[in-house]
Amino acid sequence: MLNWIAWATLAAGVVSGLLVAFHLALGHRQHMWIMHLVWPLTAIWSGPAGLWAYFRYGRAGEERAVARAAQEGEPPPNRQQPFSVLAAKGTSHCGSGCLLGDIVAELLILALPIRIFGHEIFGAWIYDLLLAFVFGIAFQYFAIKPVSEKTTAAALGKAFKADTLSLLAWQVGMFGWMAVATFGLFHRELDKATPVFWMMMQVAMFCGFATSYPVNCWLLRRGIKEKM
């Protein structure tokens, strides 16, 4: 039964991500090109919730909507949304980099396994953290650079400043849940070839969102992170 539930949640995520990607491909381009990756990736891990968020809030960031507001002398519609929405989008932006990093890391651990204290999961966390950091900083850089006149070095510096705490907070939630699942629920390390492992990773992403959201609120209020 658990395997069937896992397959259903994974399928819902993949279908949701594909629907968002298809809608973007129809010509609904985002003002920030990096959001063409963020929204489908967010829908993949969050499923129908991410799909709903894209159509409810993500379309405010469409290129033509932003251009129309500029012509009328108004602020971009995506930046006029409630603060809670802006913080959630910033958190999801962080999570997208983490998702890519985590997927690559879990595949990498199969080829280059590392065991710490006798457990492969701790070695995987090292890969997860390093790769999530690389992808996360890259995502933040491409949110900053196109809308500013900063040099590459300055934009990278701001990306490090804007996303480091957010990424660390996300990983705390993710690692925390995977530790509970591994040592508390199943009492063993899950096989990465099973749907249950990846369903647990989906749950871990929600936990990462929960722990990273307050940090993103703080970063936005301080003006350290860009509004999406």
Image: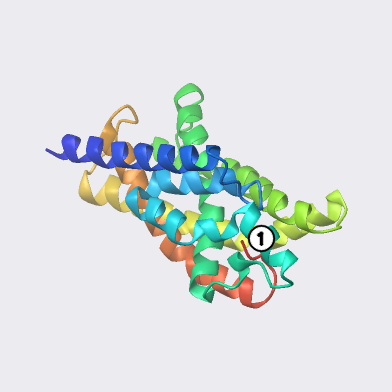
- Counting from the top left corner in percent of width and height, residue 157 is at 78, 57
Front in this rendered view, residue 201 or 4? 4
- Counting from the top left corner in percent of width and height, residue 186 is at 21, 43
Residue 26 shown left or right of residue 159 in the figure: left
In the rendered image, is residue 55 in sight?
Answer: yes
Does dot 1 land on a helix, a strand or a loop?
helix
Front in this rendered view, residue 72 or 158? 72
Residue 171 shown left or right of residue 138 in the figure: left
- Counting from the top left corner in percent of width and height, residue 30 is at 61, 50
Residue 63 shown left or right of residue 28 in the figure: right
Count all numbered tags in the image, as a single digit: 1
Residue 36 shown left or right of residue 88 in the figure: right
Quarter of the rendering occupied by the C terminus: bottom right
In the rendered image, is residue 189 in sight?
Answer: no
Label 1 amino acid? Answer: Val
Q: Residues within 10 Å of mark 1 (few under 14, many from 20)?
A: some
Residue at image location 41% in from the left, 40% down from the top: 19
